[in-house]
Image (cartoon, rainbow, N blue to C red):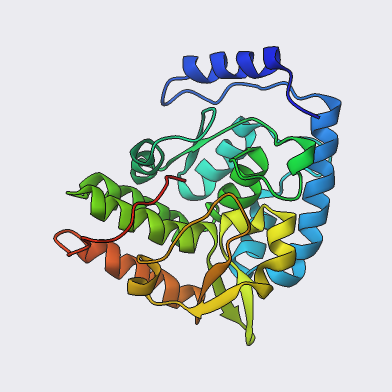
Amino acid sequence: MRVDRDVRAERQRVCRAYRSGQRPPHFVYSSDEDSLWSSVFGALGEMHEELSCAKYRSAARLVRLPTHQVPQLSEVSRTLHSLTGFELAPTIGTLPSRLFYGPLAHGILNATPDVRPVAEQSFSPDPDIIHELVGHAVMLADPEVAELYRCFGRAINDAGSAELSSAIARLFWFTMEVGLVVEKGCPRVFGAAILSSVAEMETFAHAELREFQVDDVIAGSIDDGMCQPVLYVADSVGYMIDEVRRFLATSVGRDVRGLSSSPGS
């Protein structure tokens, strides 16, 4: 299954016409797209019960994503707004770093309505609605995590250099996208990129797992075209959140020169 060019072009037109503050428009999905969502969501759901962190499982019970059809961004956005004040804004494709992170400060997550190709159902290198909703949106139902997203947005908006913005983006990647935490003595998944990928859920425990230290994380190397080979494990969700917020609060003026550049989310 690959999205018809005309369908994608229409979704792009609708996304371009969207204005901040509006309710996300209704998107039409094919039976093939509904079937792919159902297959991937079902497989992930079973894995989440065993391998996701407790915060994720609690948030998922609040969001209650549908099982058999692609959810509407508007419906999920309404649920999130009622829980944490966050909203979803439709967009197509990967955004430049500041355009993705900046709106987080104001409680807005830019999210694509597109569905990944069937050939990429287990692992998609590009963002799609499974990644946006199963990964990010569910976690945004938790007030503490939603505030952390806002902190990342504020930090990017206040960053005084490309080097600092890059460091913040790497920290986001290794926490909000591929972060792991210890619960009951075992690594559990916190990050959206793993939570929304069958392949990553199946293999994350076989990656090189390192102790979570912010200075090590922001010097790390990102490869978002494959299952991340090196992951950082925090002692707990609380420890990860505290360390991230501490870095973001004190990062202005920090010497991050010499760190390699990082792609946007």
Farthest-out residue, bottom = 185
Q: Residue at x 78, y 57 (%)?
A: 45
Residue 149: image location, x then y, percent: 41, 53
Residue 15 screen position, x and y as percent:
53, 20
Which residue is rendered at x = 73% and y = 58% of the image? 199
Left or right relative to 210: residue 255: left
* Rendered position, 224 above or below 117: below
In depth, the one of 170 and 222 nearer the eye is: 222
Q: Residue 124 is drawn in which quadrant?
A: top right
Question: In the picture provided, is 81 more to the left or to the right than 219?
Answer: right
Viewer-nearest residue: 261 or 57: 261
Tell me the residue at 53%/49% (across/down).
Answer: 83
Q: Position of residue 156 (x, y in %)?
A: 29, 48
Is residue 148 visible in the rendered image? The answer is no
Q: Compared with residue 238, is residue 248 higher up or lower down, i.e. above or below?
A: above
Name the quadrant of the N terminus: top right
Determine if residue 119 is in view.
Answer: yes
Q: Going 42% across and 57% down the picture, which residue do you hit?
A: 172
Q: Nearer the viewer, residue 16 or 93?
A: 93
Going by the picture, which residue comes out furthest to the left?
253
- Compared across the picture, whether 238 is left or right of 53 comes to left
Q: Quadrant of residue 242?
A: bottom left
Q: Position of residue 193 (x, y in %)?
A: 59, 54
